[in-house]
Every structure is written in structure tokens, then in C-alpha cells.
Image (cartoon, helix red, strand yellow):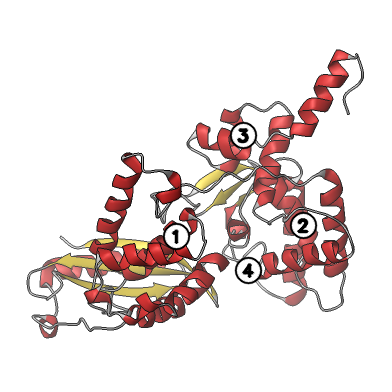
């Protein structure tokens, strides 16, 4: 029986839906026959996939595909270039940068089908000698895995699979379990915890610089709205830049985050979150403004229109420039990333006395321990000040 699925993709032309139908068969070299097609609407994609699956179940695969080898040998660097070309609009800035760097390294010369676990181990040794952290090496390997993982898909038709990477990871895990000293481990499966949080004064400096950038005559991105929305909802910038007006439920004061980041579920992890701390009022105002502009332009409301129609990397690039400007002006601020706003927002909720179980409904964490260990970044100075004030009957500020 043919299987079917529909996945949402972010392209240069907006949100698109790729329908895919696959039928297991021993009549092709790769063991299955597959068809895919991209549509503007999810419903249309589902309907096409359903009909194609039924047709394949009845008629079988087209005869001209039988016993035809579609695979070819290419180098890892070539595959990475193909992968970046196909998925560039859906990749994070760090992943894209890392893959481009990996493609230029020695490992990129080898054909994908010839790679073994030893190539990955040698790559890890080389990177560690260069002084990078074990977790950075692990991220590199996962990025390689994501590119090799699509090698046999219709868009690429490259000979190779991820078995050699999985074997290398097993070896790394064995080292970890055998209590190999941390200094001798080639990779680390967890990043060092980041404990810094923006202070109130740092946020005021950044807000002032973002406002200047936003008010520039050529500016289009509403940085302050995105900043306030990010802090209030604890959403990632990539999530913010892909929410649609159809995801906004004004009556229930909620927003649907589609395909929210999850350790195992790469697509379909749709999460409903509450609009709190002013985010509901912010979206309501933007919605009314959006409807007004559509009427003035004679356009029809489309539920798939993006609330913040900007590339996430453009937003983070503006953030980085503003941070750099604040530092150049002589302010000694931390290396605050836009992603730190997620932890900043979560910490504000914890300061209000929200229990972790309630905060997790906003941040989307299913593991309360992760939320507590990483996002509950208590200010050591604040703890000392509150203790001093309590002991001397002074009012905490």
C-alpha cells in the first residue's frame, strides 16, 4: 500500500506544501517508487497525495521506472552544495555557514558512497586539534548527516546513506559511557550551559538602537514589535517569521506554532500556545492594521499571509548590527544573541512566580528538567541582593 505525507516548506515565494507518495517495490534499484509535487495550499497537496496513492495501489508503478538505477556518485562537497541550493530558505544561519565550511575541508573530496566511520572520526580529531569544542564537532557531524540523509531522494539521486555516520556516533557514545576523560573525548553531546541573561540596562540600550534602525527611511522590519513578541511568547525568531494569520485565534487568544522544533519530530509538531504579556494586544493591533491595508489596496484576506513577512536571518542580522553599534559606542554589554530572548522571557515568567509546568506551555518544553536547567538562569547578583535586603528588612527592588 502506498504511503503519503505532506510537509510544509518555506521558500522564496512563501509557504509551500510538498506532497510525497511512496510505494515499496522490488522492481526499482532503491526498493521503492516515489512521486512528489509542491502546492500553495495544504488541502490541495493532501488531495493530490491521496489520489496518487490510490492510483498507485491499483495500477502499480510506471513501467519505465522498473529496474532503472537512478543513483550517481558525487563528492560530499557537491552533495552539500545541492543540499544548500534545495533547502537554503529553510536552514538556520549557523547550519548554512557550517555546511559551507565543511564542503571546503578534506572530507568534502570523497564521494558520498565511499565515506566510512573512519572519515568521520578523522574529521572529529582534526577539528578538536584546531581547538573547537566537542559539541561544535558533534553539530558538524549532525549537519553532515542531514545532507547525506537526503542523498537518495528524487531531487538528488546520489548513491550513499548515513550508516557510516551512525556507526561513528556509536563509537563516540561508547567513549562517553566508558568514562573517557572529557579532555580526551572527540565530541560532546551537550553544549556548555549558557548562564548569562540580558540585564535591564542592556535591554534598554539595545531597544534604543533597534528603534533607530527601525525608524530609518529604508527600514522595513518592525524590530521592536518582533522584540516584544519574542520576549512575551518565548518563540524562536524562525518560528515568529513563519506564523500565518490563520494561526492566530483572536477569540481564544492563542497562536499555533507549526512544525515547532522538537528533538525527534522534524515536521508536524504543531503546538498551540497562549498569547500573554501583551503579545495578544500586539497581534490584534497588527491584524486590524493588516485588514485595513488590504481593503485600501483592494486585496482579499488570505489566511496563509505571514504575520511577520521577513526572513529570520535578516532579523538576526539587524540585531547583531545593533548590538555591535552599542558596543562600539563604549557600552560593555554581553554577547547577547537574539535566541537569548527566549530564556529572558522564560525567566521573567519565573520571576512572576509561574511554576515550571505553566511556563512550559509557553516555551514548548516537554521535559521540565531541560527548562529548569537551561532556561531558569537565576541572576546570582540578584539572589545576593534579595538575601541582604531580607536580612536587613529592606525593600527588594
Q: Pick the residue in front: 77 or 5.
A: 77
Query: Which element is circle 1 on?
Result: helix
Q: Residue at coordinates 20% horizontally, 81% vertically from top-left?
A: 71
**For the residue labelled by badge 4, is the local secondary structure a helix, a strand or a loop?**
helix
- Which residue is denoted by mark 4 in the rendering? 313
Q: CA distance from mark 1 to mark 3?
A: 32 Å
Label 3 to label 4: alpha-carbon separation = 27 Å
What whole-number distance in Å separates the C-alpha atoms at marks 2 and 3?
22 Å
Residue contact between numbered discs 1 and 4, judged by CB atoms under 8 Å: no
Which quadrant is the N terminus positioned in?
bottom left
- Please provide percent x and percent y for residue 274: 63, 41
Question: To which residue does mark 3 refer?
Answer: 359
* Label drawn at residue 137: 1
Which labelled disc corresponds to residue 225?
Answer: 2
State which tag comes first along the sequence, 1 or 3.
1
N-terminal of the two: label 2 or label 4? 2
The Cα–Cα distance between marks 1 and 4, rounded to whole angstroms, is 23 Å
Amino acid at each position: 500500500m502506498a504511503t503519503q505525507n505532506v510537509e510544509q516548506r518555506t521558500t522564496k515565494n512563501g509557504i509551500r506544501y510538498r506532497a510525497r507518495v511512496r510505494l515499496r517495490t522490488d522492481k526499482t534499484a532503491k526498493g521503492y517508487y516515489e512521486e512528489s509535487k509542491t502546492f500553495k495550499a495544504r488541502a490541495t497537496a493532501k488531495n493530490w497525495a491521496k489520489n496518487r496513492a490510490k492510483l498507485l495501489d491499483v495500477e502499480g508503478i510506471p513501467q519505465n521506472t522498473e529496474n532503472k538505477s537512478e543513483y550517481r556518485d558525487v563528492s560530499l562537497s557537491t552533495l552539500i552544495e545541492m543540499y544548500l541550493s534545495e533547502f537554503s530558505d529553510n536552514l538556520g544561519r549557523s547550519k548554512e555557514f557550517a555546511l559551507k565550511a565543511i564542503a571546503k575541508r578534506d572530507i568534502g573530496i570523497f564521494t558520498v558512497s565511499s565515506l566510512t566511520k573512519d572519515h568521520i572520526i578523522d574529521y572529529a580529531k582534526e577539528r578538536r586539534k584546531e581547538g573547537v569544542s566537542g559539541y561544535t564537532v558533534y553539530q558538524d557531524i549532525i549537519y553532515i548527516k542531514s545532507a547525506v540523509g537526503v542523498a537518495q531522494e528524487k531531487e538528488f539521486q546520489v548513491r550513499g546513506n548515513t550508516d557510516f555516520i551512525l556507526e561513528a556516533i556509536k563509537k563516540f557514545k561508547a567513549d562517553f559511557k566508558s568514562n573517557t576523560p572529557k579532555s580526551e573525548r572527540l565530541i560532546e553531546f551537550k553544549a556548555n550551559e549558557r548562564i548569562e541573561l540580558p540585564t535591564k540596562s542592556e535591554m534598554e540600550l539595545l531597544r534604543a538602537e533597534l528603534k533607530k534602525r527601525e525608524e530609518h527611511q529604508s527600514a522595513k522590519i518592525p524590530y521592536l514589535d518582533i522584540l516584544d513578541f519574542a520576549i512575551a511568547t518565548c518563540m524562536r525568531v524562525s518560528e515568529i517569521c513563519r506564523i500565518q494569520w490563520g494561526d492566530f485565534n483572536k477569540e481564544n487568544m492563542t497562536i499555533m506554532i507549526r512544525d515547532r522544533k522538537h528533538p525527534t519530530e522534524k515536521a508536524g509538531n504543531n503546538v498551540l500556545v497562549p498569547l500573554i504579556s501583551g503579545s495578544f494586544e500586539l497581534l490584534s493591533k497588527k491584524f486590524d492594521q493588516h485588514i485595513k491595508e488590504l481593503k485600501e489596496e483592494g486585496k482579499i484576506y488570505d489566511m496563509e499571509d505571514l504575520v511577520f513577512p521577513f526572513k529570520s536571518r535578516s532579523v538576526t542580522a539587524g540585531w547583531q548590527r545593533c548590538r555591535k553599534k552599542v558596543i562600539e559606542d563604549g557600552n560593555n554589554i554581553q554577547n547577547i544573541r537574539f535566541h537569548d530572548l527566549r530564556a529572558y522571557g522564560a525567566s521573567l515568567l519565573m520571576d512572576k512566580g509561574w511554576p515550571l509546568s505553566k511556563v512550559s506551555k509557553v516555551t514548548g518544553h516537554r521535559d521540565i528538567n531541560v527548562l529548569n536547567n537551561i532556561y531558569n538562569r537565576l541572576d546570582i547578583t540578584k539572589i545576593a541582593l534579595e538575601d541582604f535586603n531580607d536580612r536587613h528588612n529592606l525593600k527588594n527592588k
